[in-house]
Amino acid sequence: MHTSRYAVQLTDVTKRYGDGPNAVLALDQVGAGIESGTFTAVMGPSGSGKSTFLHCAAGLDRPTAGEVRLGGQDLSGLRERRLTELRRTRVGFVFQAFNLLPSLTVEQNITLPLRLAGRRPEEAWLRHIVTVMDLGDRLTRHPAQLSGGQQQRVAIARALVTRPEVVFADEPTGALDPETARDILVLLRQAVTDLHQTVVMVTHDPIAAAHTDQVLFLSGGRVVDGMVDPRADRVAEVMSGLRRAV
Ligand code: ADP
């Protein structure tokens, strides 16, 4: 167990792609602390650095400068192998396109991160997340036999199975109709409130952001604004201001 109250902490994180005149500053001295047990949205206009933020925070990409701490651990000192291990066990991912393996059953998909890490499922935790995600009667099905919303529930269960420090969700409701999207957001909220997990979600949707505890707004690779207990109309206002400024 870690002692930091931050699940993820970025300090002066800069990410530059390329060199010389063609270099792109995707993140420019970003500082952000995501407290454990919270639900955070990362928003901003296209090209503002949201994906880069997510990738650096999750240890998928290394910053050019600055420090990323995951559960108190500084990622910059880690060799590639340790970083891979950390991504498998201490970070969960949920994607827009679900990214389930079609040949595996629901249960095998959910427990895959544990098998990759050479760990056994904790039965009680597994049952708990399967119940919260309402997948108990579908464990032997295959992804193709499920609706989009059900597939995303499997993906969330898979992201939670290792009890990660943080779950990163990249537009998790982008491929779903509004009603199903709402169900998924309620489940992500439950993962935080009932299962005491930490979720960081990139979204462009103010209604999705309104389900979170706080929003970080990015523009031009910098954190330019924040909002606690966001409401969709206020989020939409900030977003249109940022789009106008681009
Ligand atoms: P967002 O997710 O908000 O759309 P990104 O993080 O994808 O923004 O991109 C931020 C900036 O970095 C953009 O200008 C983008 O073109 C640039 N960028 C992202 N990834 C790369 C890359 N691999 N190589 C070069 N430029 C990149």
Image (spheres, grey):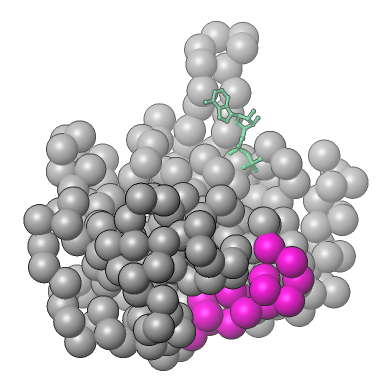
- Give the image quadrant in which the ligand numbered 1 is located: top right
Picture quarter with the N terminus? bottom left
- Magenta stretch: residue 191 in it? yes
The residues colored magenta run 176-192
Kindly give the residue lying farthest to the top in the view shown: 20
| Coordinates of residue 112 in the picture (x, y in percent) | 26, 57
Give me the residue at 16% from left, 72% from top. 121
Q: Is residue 215 above or below residue 62?
A: below
Considering the whole magenta stretch, tell me its main secondary structure: helix
Q: From the viewer's perspective, is 244 left or right of 222? A: right
| Coordinates of residue 212 in the picture (x, y in percent) | 60, 76
Q: Is residue 129 above or below residue 10?
A: below
Q: In terms of depth relative to the viewer, which is nearer, 81 or 74?
A: 81
Give me the residue at 51% from left, 64% from top. 145
Kindly give the residue lying farthest to the bottom in the view shown: 194
Task: Give the total number of marks visible in the rendering.
Answer: 0
Picture quadrant where residue 226 is located: bottom right
| Coordinates of residue 129 in the picture (x, y in percent) | 35, 81
**In this orientation, does residue 46 appear?**
yes
Picture quadrant where residue 202 is located: bottom right
Q: In terms of depth relative to the viewer, which is nearer, 164 or 27?
A: 164
Q: From the viewer's perspective, is 124 left or right of 155? A: left
Give me the residue at 56% from left, 51% from top. 97
**In this orientation, does residue 203 appear?**
no
Q: Is residue 42 above or below residue 21?
A: below
| Coordinates of residue 135 in the picture (x, y in percent) | 42, 80
Picture quarter with the C terminus? top right
Give me the residue at 51% from left, 23% from top. 17
- Magenta stretch: residue 180 in it? yes
